[in-house]
Amino acid sequence: MTTGPETAADKRGEAGEVARLLSYVAILAVSAWLFFEAGSLPTSRWDVLGAGAFPQLVFGVLALLALAAIVGALRGLRPAALADFGAATLGWLKRRYLVVALLALFGIYLAVLPLAGFSPATFVFLLAAQFLLLPRRPRTIAVALVLAVVFSFGLNELFASVFNVFLPRGGF
Amino acid sequence: MLDSLLLGAGQIFTLSTLVFMFLGSMAGIIAAAIPGFTVTMAIILTLPLTFAMPPLQGIAVMLSVYVGGYTGGLISAALLGIPGTPSAMATTFDAFPMARAGQPGRALSLGVWASFFGTLISTAVLIVAAPPLAIIAVKLGPWEYFSLIVFALTIIASLVANSLLRGLMAGAIGLAISTVGPDPMMGRPRFDFGVEMLAPGLPFLVVLIGIFAISQLVSEVEDARAVRSGTALTTRDIDFQNWAVIREIVMRPVNLVRSSVVGVLVGALPGAGGSIANLLAYDQAKRASKTPEKFGTGIPEGVVASEAGNSATAGGGLIPMIALGIPGSAVDAILMASLMVHGISVGPRLIMDHADLVYGMFIAMVVASLMMLVVCLASMRLFLRVTEIPKWAIVPAVIVCCVVGSFALNNRVTDLYLLGFIGLAGYALKSLDYPLAPLVLGVILGPIAETNLRRALQTDADWTVFLTRPVSLLLLVAAVLSVAWAIWKHKKSSLPNETG
């Protein structure tokens, strides 16, 4: 029962509960699907359980846990919380714009790495990520440049010459 | 015995062996301090370098990497909140909050000294009790191993989660991840859906790096203002307080000895290792504490329990290897392989045929722990420079180290895509308040659990055997009790809110 005016923090807390509820639903759906998928895995006469039994056990337990979590979450949620969820999620993402940008850069880096090769892709990723995060001062920019060179070309050289590990060379 | 001890000592205390051991100790600490570079990876990289050495020198160097590595995981666990290795998982629970509260030097000192004492205690147990302990450990069948894993997962779920259900779900998600790829008994493909990346299964190290490192690194940049202002991870003055820390540990010996004994016992169980020992030792310390609610807030008992527990597995893991030729962990398997490369067969006759080698290994363990202490104490200020590096510099650089670590494991580009996906999923789960430790433990323990469950039922199709074998029953009862305890604890803590 709400006893006073709702604060922004209350709304954020409720939005978090809705997000968790959605995660339980997603886990229930995926585990139920994979539970039945595991049932179709072949068995062997040498093996009492077969390849699908352990996954069925795991996904069955996971589905039950998710179901219990859904029931628990639904009991504590106000219907209005669902209506506020979209706006709260957008606000959450806006507050974490650096996280979103860094993850996007990381995704692009991983996609480009096999094509461009480790050193050039890493150099560009490091420069871009550091420029995204750093306070723009001549000294920090110089440090960022040095770090980008050391952790791209330097790391590649270290692994190749010392550990005999050859990082992706690129397809171009 | 004395002859063998002196012969072994004669081979260890040579200049070249000591120098190589010192380098090995440094390499282990540095490798394990980098998230994604585990003790296993460090040992694998060291193995080819020891081929040209005499057997004892080679294994002494690898033991130095081993002992150093168990302590190195503490550095990133305490300073970055990222366990450098799975065995430092519980170290993050208290060392990281302690470092964040302005005491990074104390957190590191506590961890290093606890590791040192833990290794010494485990070596003493190794020397005195290797044969009887190994016999007990080997008598455990697949029923007991499966029950042990159930127990380990329920403990961790009840230990780290704000919600027991989410903790158990995280553990089950980890087990589910482990079912992707060829099944561990017959090699049948499972859940790959024709995707090349999924066909070989999801390597647990990539999952570990993605779940812990990437999600932690990304969450470091959540506060844009702090990042842009150049805020370091910790900012206060660093004071190691070595004497105070030694006094703190020695004056409360029960926690240290109990955690070390847990580490030895877990290490002696084949398949179990530091990744379980640190959590079990932490759990035992929490249960025995008069103030269990303070665990997780940065208290010394938590750091000591985890670090003594994981370091003590080094000695414990050697027990079944030396006595019966069964490796206690992946690292012990590599140590075993290094002996076999030199034509030494590892088995019950090892201690009879190569007593000097075995006693030399005991001495090497003591020397390695002393070297670890010296290297850590001498270079900790250097390691602590990590805390002075601003987030804008360290976050992208460590992300690149994670990418390199993930790729170097199997030389597969698809592992990098997996890293990205798991990192994103890890951040989402972290944001939704799912504990990540049970998930990773589930991934590591999944194949062991499945293999033992299927072996148990191959031996006897009757499920009730899990309840009729005393040790298995004891472990399952302990698992139920740990869940019941967590529910009781949750109800107790929510009672004042409901009535107030």
Image (tube, coloured by chain):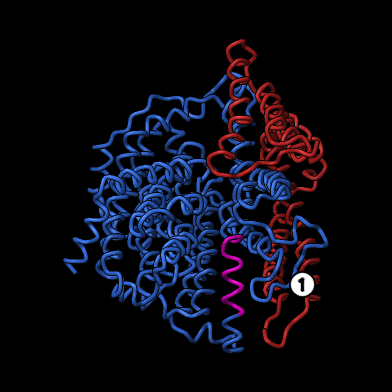
Kindly identify which chain the residue marked by label 1 belongs to.
Answer: A
Q: Position of residue B92 (x, y in %)?
A: 48, 45
Q: Please state if B177 lies on the left or on the right of B483 as rendered.
A: right
Q: Residue at x 51, y 46 (%)?
A: B83
Q: Which residues are magenta?
A: B442-454
Determine the image quadrant of residue B314: bottom left
Chain depicted in blue: B
Residue picked out by circle 1:
A38
Q: Is residue B387 shown left or right of residue B180?
A: left
In the image, is residue B453 part of the stretch drawn in magenta?
Answer: yes
Locate residue B152, reporting x and y percent. 50, 65
Question: Is residue B74 left or right of B411 when viewed as pictured?
Answer: left
Residue B413: image location, x then y, percent = 72, 47
| Image point (47%, 61%), residue name | B334
- The one of B400 and B455 positioned closer to us in this rendering: B400
Where does residue B15 sit, x and y in percent of width and height? Answer: 26, 45
Viewer-side residue, B267 vs B21: B21
Of residue B257 and residue A138, the one placed in the foreground of this image is A138
**Eyeballing the image, is B218 above or below B282?**
above
Tell me where residue B220 sits by quadrant: top right
**Which quarter of the figure has residue A112?**
top right
Q: What residue is drawn where x is 68% and y is 24%?
A: A127
Q: Residue furthest front?
A: B52
Is residue B473 in sight in this rendering?
Answer: no
Q: Looking at the colours in the rendered structure, which chain would you say is drawn in red?
A: A
Q: Is residue B129 magenta?
A: no
